[in-house]
Image (cartoon, helix red, strand yellow):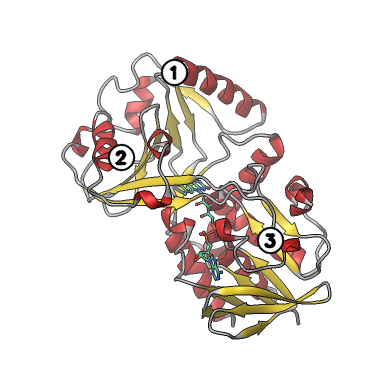
Amino acid sequence: MTQFVVVGAGIIGTSIAYRLAERGHSVTVVERVHLGAGTSGSSFAWTNSNEKTPYSYHLINALGMRAHRELENEFGDCPWHHGGGAVEWRSNTDEAQELNERVERLIGWGYPAEWISAQRLHRLEPALVQGASGDAKIAYFPDEGWVDPSVYIEFFLGRARFLGVKLRCETVTGIDLKADKVIGVRTASGKTIGADVVVNCTGRWANDLGQDVRLTFPLAPTIGLVVVTAPAASGVRRVIRTSGINLRPDGAGRIMLHSEHDEQGLTLESGADATDPVAAAMIERAARLYPELSGVRPEAMRLSHRAIPGDGVSAVGPVPQVSGYYAAVTHSGATLAPWLGQVVAAELVGGAPEKALQDFRPARFY
Ligand SMILES: Cc1cc2nc3c(=O)[nH]c(=O)nc-3n(C[C@H](O)[C@H](O)[C@H](O)COP(=O)(O)OP(=O)(O)OC[C@H]3O[C@@H](n4cnc5c(N)ncnc54)[C@H](O)[C@@H]3O)c2cc1C
């Protein structure tokens, strides 16, 4: 039986750990903070394959969306997964043109995307202020939705532990090699955890395990910002994307807000304080769409790093020159996790390489 060490208990690591355990393997998950403490805990977590290019990247995200839906056949109720589709309109001319081209491209790729009337938009979102979309064309992506990463992680790690997976709260500080073969990891407490295979699922920290330079590859993380409101009866039902703000429900009446515009100029040192005027300004913009959000206070502002390999797409696979070391580092992890869990586990236990991953191998960086 192969001994696996999965480093990182985010949405990717827990998915892979569970699927390895399901196949009867010995798995230890090593996490330095707590489950979901990394990017997964600060994600907008919109399940989509909407703005993904090239086609190969679109395809794996579409497979991720399908894998989320299929979890319902496997487990029944999946309380972390919310459907309802996403609606989008753009008031800015350049953005409207981009949306036009994107919808046509997505329809051409067989992705569920359609134009809807303002009346249909208001039937989908009755609390939206009348005329919110103005003269803009309104796109609807019926298969999209969002996930609650922490709920997902708890479920999968719970299942994994039931199958014997061990969780160790330790910081990995080094990868042990014997010649060109991985034999385990070292931790900050001075312990060694033996392994035949180490799976690096530490996202934006993937190069910080004190590892041999042969095991690193370029990363280009960007700063992400989300704001969560206090509970309010705002009527937001699904993922809404506009030129000014993106929003979606976040449980118990809370709304999660995201705006790429407000991320510009931030650093992790910027601090994340719900009293920051940026948070109030984001809610104010959302309240122009959903009047019941007016005066609702921000409950949390979260800053984090997106885990993005140097060329902007996923890095999933073994690294060359060293055996027993596999990396699974990607943006769009909330969408990709259930599919990556399945296909990465299958590869790790000796299955055929997954064709859909061929453009995303870390080997391209070496
Ligand atoms: C603002 C924002 C919006 C996003 N929106 C979306 C979206 O709409 N849709 C989508 O699909 N994706 C989205 N993403 C991306 C998605 O959230 C990430 O791709 C995903 O969460 C990455 O998960 P992960 O498990 O790889 O990494 P993480 O969740 O970061 O997990 C890595 C774990 O490794 C641990 N770790 C790190 N170093 C060590 C060490 N040395 N020893 C032990 N443990 C260690 C960390 O503590 C952490 O828990 C968004 C991200 C951000 C920031």
Element class at badge 1: loop
Label 2 sits on residue: 236
Element class at badge 3: strand
Q: Residues within 10 Å of mark 2 (few under 14, many from 20)?
A: many
Label 3 sits on residue: 327
Res. 265 visible in picture: yes
| Residue drawn at 37 percent across, 27 percent down | 121
Q: Earlier in the sequence, mark 3 or mark 2?
A: 2
133 or 242, nearer to the observer: 242
| Residue drawn at 49 percent across, 17 percent down | 94
Q: Is residue 320 left or right of residue 219?
A: right
Total count of labels: 3
Q: Are marks 3 and 2 in contact (CB under 8 Å)?
A: no
Q: Earlier in the sequence, mark 1 or mark 3?
A: 1
In three-dimensional space, the C-alpha distance between marks 1 and 2, rounded to whole angstroms, equals 20 Å
Element class at badge 2: loop
Q: Amino acid at mark 2?
A: Val
Label 1 sits on residue: 137
